[in-house]
Image (tube, rainbow, N blue to C red):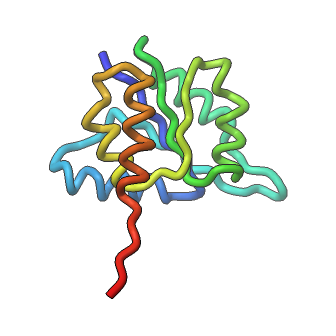
């Protein structure tokens, strides 16, 4: 078994990250689920889809949810669902984070979440000439 992973982002951002990560890893990450959120009027749609994905992803080792932006609709919606599903959320998804989660998905949920945050931070640097 391994930690289930659900990616929830604005539009297709998560799908693009998954595609790039699969290219780099050289293998399919089809066990990672992706739910795009779209705006409909003043509120995002997708709560039932996110809840269903959390349930589907849970094989008994917990679920890590990766979202794109702290305080935005995807993370706010997921935050409301975390306790009902016993899931953990990490915000600010980037490619380094996603690849790290893929590599550590067979470890305990808490470790996978910490590795996601550590890798995400290490993948952000300033270079200047």
In the rendered image, which quarter is residue 100 located in?
A: top left
Left or right: residue 78 compared with residue 121: right
Q: Is residue 59 above or below residue 127?
A: above
> Quick check: 41 above or below 59?
below
Which residue corresponds to the image point at 15% horizontal and 49% vertical from the top-left? 26
Image quadrant containing the C terminus: bottom left
Judged from this view, the residue extending furthest toward the front is 129
Judge by depth and name the residue closer to the eye, 71 or 8: 71
Image location of residue 116, percent across then percent down = 40, 40
Q: Residue at x 53, y 52 (%)?
A: 92
Q: Quadrant of the N terminus?
A: top left
Q: Position of residue 91 (x, y in %)?
A: 55, 46
| Residue 124 image position (x, y, % from top left) | 40, 62
Q: Residue at (44%, 24%) from the top-left corner? A: 110
Q: Residue furthest top?
A: 60
Q: Of 81 and 45, which appears nearest the observer?
A: 81
| Number of numbered discs overlaid on the protein picture | 0
Outermost residue toward the left? 26
Q: Residue 39, how many percent across, how many down?
A: 72, 57
In this rendering, position of residue 114 left or right of residue 99: right
Q: Residue furthest bottom?
A: 129
In the image, what residue occupies the spot 68% across and 34% down?
79
């Amino acid at each position: 078994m391994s930690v289930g992973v659900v990616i929830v982002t604005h539009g297709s951002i998560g799908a693009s990250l998954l595609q790039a990560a699969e290219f780099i890893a050289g293998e399919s990450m089809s066990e990672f689920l992706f739910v795009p959120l779209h705006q409909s009027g003043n509120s995002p749609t997708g709560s039932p889809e996110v809840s269903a994905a959390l349930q589907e992803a849970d094989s008994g080792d917990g679920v890590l949810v990766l979202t794109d932006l702290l305080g935005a609709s995807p993370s706010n919606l997921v935050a409301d669902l975390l306790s009902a599903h016993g899931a953990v959320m990490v915000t600010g998804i980037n490619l380094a984070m996603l690849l790290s989660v893929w590599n550590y998905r067979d470890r305990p949920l808490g470790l996978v979440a910490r590795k996601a945050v550590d890798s995400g931070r290490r993948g952000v640097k300033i270079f200047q000439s």
